[in-house]
């Protein structure tokens, strides 16, 4: 259903009686408080749930005794949710006849730009908006002078020049790799094709038509205040982007701006950009399922569209459930990237079938855990790290860097007290420990190097068949397990296959992903279910 803009503005504030709106706000506030109150991050959240003509909102902080530092006039860094806005601009240009998703990326960049290809196969725009371009996560050689503001020194000239240093490892479109690099190139390309700087383009084509009066990149409207970002326990500087690269993650917006954005995505606001918004939802790739910069996620037999965002001091979550005409917005003035993001709360607000999660609270680590973790480790593809136990606390020292003191919470994770780093211990089935190092959105498995380990065994076809099957882990999300070439292989819904190594009886792991799977047997001795352990979480599924 589509309504005129002026009519919708009236409907959203008057269609429901006051007590109904107040009740919806109170219900949402209780759910958010259940997840947030007392959380060690100290975060403040602005949350809205949009459903047809009703909008419920709440503003809360983890410490409910402190003054509320955010409000309706607070503009948050929305991080990578900005990518969905860049996709909308691209779709709008395509609908205006100014290009196609089948265009090579090179055709949208200045003549002479050296864009890599693989055996003559170019990167197309469809590959960029589905993160299948083959370009790495970040531009090669990006070495920020200030790690707290990593993109501030990067301009379009340096971004384009860096393409000459890239070699693709596979045909574009053949594999998923989330790439901020590709998204920055798209941001620049869209502004260039439109003949406008990106902020002006966003304002004219998206913000103004949708009534997003507080949204901006650099030109802050007078009526809003820029929220201060935090990592858990400390304020951090804002992230800055060159204007035409800001479509990767440089938009700031208030909660009301994002409510208007969600309402438009659900078809409740009529505007010239509305057909372009709808175009971004259509499926473009299968593994994982994506539209144009939207993740298409199975939810209880329906398909929801989602995107999370994160900067050094902020996290965000936006979801659309078109079938139910429901949308969710969460804006945090504190980075939750290292603790897994806002997905747990966000998915629960999309559909209560997803578990809500609980606040992270500080607790002392068990002495036996500290003793077991102490040792030397290698971060995959990165540095070596030493873990030491001292005076009931864990200390981490990356190779050539200063030692970091670590706190510990009731989720079983260690967190650096002076940096945005989380260490997730993983107890292997053989009793030894590894961990996953989480920093700035990267999840890096660590393998202990001061202990010798035997190579994984090769299993018979009969042994592998005992585990094969489909294991639903949550509504619309299952793990398919199959045997091949002496090893188990697993594939989650909408994702790529990965190999598993046997580490103990009925226990397998994929070290590159920090995954361990434990199979559970029934009274008859046959495999009946499994537990998937990853990043401190456990998902369980019964074999079908």
Image (spheres, rainbow, N blue to C red):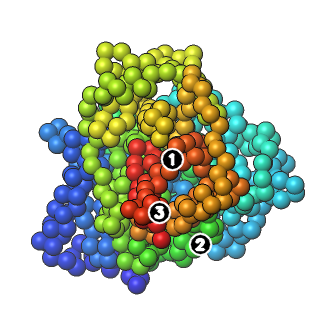
Please give the name of the residue rendered at 45% of the width and 60% of the height, measured from the top-left corner.
525
For this view, does 270 lie left or right of residue 198? Answer: left
Q: Which residue is mark 1?
A: 505
Q: Which residue is mark 2?
A: 283
- Crowding around mark 1 (Cα neighbors within 10 Å: few <14, some 14 to 19, many 20+) is few
Where is residue 361 shown, x and y percent of the image?
Answer: 25, 38
Find residue 365 and report its image quarter.
top left
Q: Secondary structure at mark 2?
A: loop
Q: Secondary structure at mark 3?
A: loop
Where does the N terminus fall, quadrant-wise? bottom left
Q: CA distance from mark 3 to mark 1?
A: 13 Å
Q: Nearer the viewer, residue 368 or 47?
A: 368
Disc 2 versus disc 1: nearer the observer: 1
* Mark toward the start of the polypeptide (3 vs 2): 2
Q: CA distance from mark 3 to mark 2?
A: 39 Å
Disc 3 versus disc 2: nearer the observer: 3
Q: Secondary structure at mark 1?
A: loop
Please give the name of the residue rendered at 65% of the width and 37% of the height, measured from the top-left corner.
455
Pointers 2 and 1 in contact (C-beta within 8 Å): no
For this view, does 387 lie left or right of residue 153? Answer: left
* Mark toward the start of the polypeptide (3 vs 1): 1
Please give the name of the residue rendered at 39% of the width and 18% of the height, measured from the top-left corner.
389
Please give the name of the residue rendered at 38% of the width and 31% of the height, measured from the top-left corner.
415
Q: Nearer the viewer, residue 456 or 441?
A: 456
Q: Which residue is mark 3?
A: 526
- Crowding around mark 2 (Cα neighbors within 10 Å: few <14, some 14 to 19, many 20+) is some
- Crowding around mark 3 (Cα neighbors within 10 Å: few <14, some 14 to 19, many 20+) is few
Q: Is residue 375 above or below residue 410?
A: above
Where is residue 205 shown, x and y percent of the image?
Answer: 53, 65
């Amino acid at each position: 259903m589509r309504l005129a803009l002026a009519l919708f503005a009236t409907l959203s504030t008057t269609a429901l009686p006051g007590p109904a709106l107040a009740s919806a706000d109170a219900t949402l506030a209780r759910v958010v408080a259940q997840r947030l109150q007392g959380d060690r991050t100290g975060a403040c959240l602005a949350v809205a749930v949009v459903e047809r003509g009703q909008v419920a909102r709440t503003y809360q902080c983890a410490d409910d005794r402190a003054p509320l530092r955010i409000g309706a006039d607070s503009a948050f860094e929305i991080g990578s949710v900005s990518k969905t806005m860049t996709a909308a601009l691209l779709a709008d240009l395509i609908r205006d006849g100014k290009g196609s998703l089948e265009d090579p990326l090179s055709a949208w960049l200045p003549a002479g730009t050296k864009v890599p290809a693989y055996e003559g196969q170019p990167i197309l725009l469809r590959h960029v908006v589905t993160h299948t371009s083959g370009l790495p996560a970040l531009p090669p050689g990006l070495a920020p002078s200030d790690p707290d503001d990593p993109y501030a020194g990067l301009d379009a000239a340096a971004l384009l020049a860096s393409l000459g240093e890239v070699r693709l490892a596979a045909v574009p479109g053949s594999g998923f790799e989330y790439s901020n690099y590709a998204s920055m190139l798209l941001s620049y390309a869209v502004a260039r094709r439109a003949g406008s700087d990106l902020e002006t383009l966003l304002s004219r084509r998206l913000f103004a038509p949708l009534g997003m009066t507080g949204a901006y990149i650099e030109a802050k409207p007078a009526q809003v205040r820029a929220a201060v970002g935090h990592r858990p326990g400390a304020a951090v500087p804002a992230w800055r982007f060159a204007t035409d690269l800001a479509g990767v993650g440089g938009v700031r917006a208030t909660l009301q701006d994002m409510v208007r954005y969600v309402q438009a995505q659900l078809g409740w606001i009529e505007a010239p950009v509305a057909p372009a918004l709808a175009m971004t939802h259509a499926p473009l790739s299968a593994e994982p399922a994506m539209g144009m910069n939207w993740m298409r996620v199975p939810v209880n037999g329906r398909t929801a569209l989602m995107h999370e965002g994160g900067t050094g001091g902020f996290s965000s979550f936006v979801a659309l459930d078109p079938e139910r005409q429901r949308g969710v917005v969460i804006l945090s003035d504190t980075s939750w990237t290292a603790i897994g993001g806002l997905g747990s709360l966000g998915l629960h607000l999309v559909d209560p079938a997803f578990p809500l999660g609980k606040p992270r609270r500080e607790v002392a680590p068990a002495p036996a855990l500290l003793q077991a973790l102490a040792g030397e480790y290698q971060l995959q593809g990165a540095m070596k790290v030493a873990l030491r136990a001292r005076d009931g606390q864990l200390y981490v020292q990356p190779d050539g860097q200063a030692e970091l003191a670590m706190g510990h919470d009731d989720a079983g994770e260690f967190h650096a007290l002076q940096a945005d780093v989380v260490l997730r211990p993983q107890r292997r089935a053989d009793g030894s420990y590894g961990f996953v190092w989480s920093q700035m959105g990267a999840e890096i498995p660590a393998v202990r190097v001061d202990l010798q380990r035997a190579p994984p065994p090769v299993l018979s076809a009969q042994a592998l068949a005992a585990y094969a099957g489909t294991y639903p882990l949550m509504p619309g999300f299952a793990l398919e397990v199959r045997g091949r070439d002496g090893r188990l292989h697993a594939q989650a819904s909408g994702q790529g296959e990965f190999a598993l190594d046997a580490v103990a009886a009925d226990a397998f792991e994929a070290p590159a992903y920090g995954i361990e799977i434990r199979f559970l047997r029934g009274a008859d001795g046959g495999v009946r279910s499994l537990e998937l352990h990853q990043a401190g979480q456990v998902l369980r599924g019964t074999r079908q």
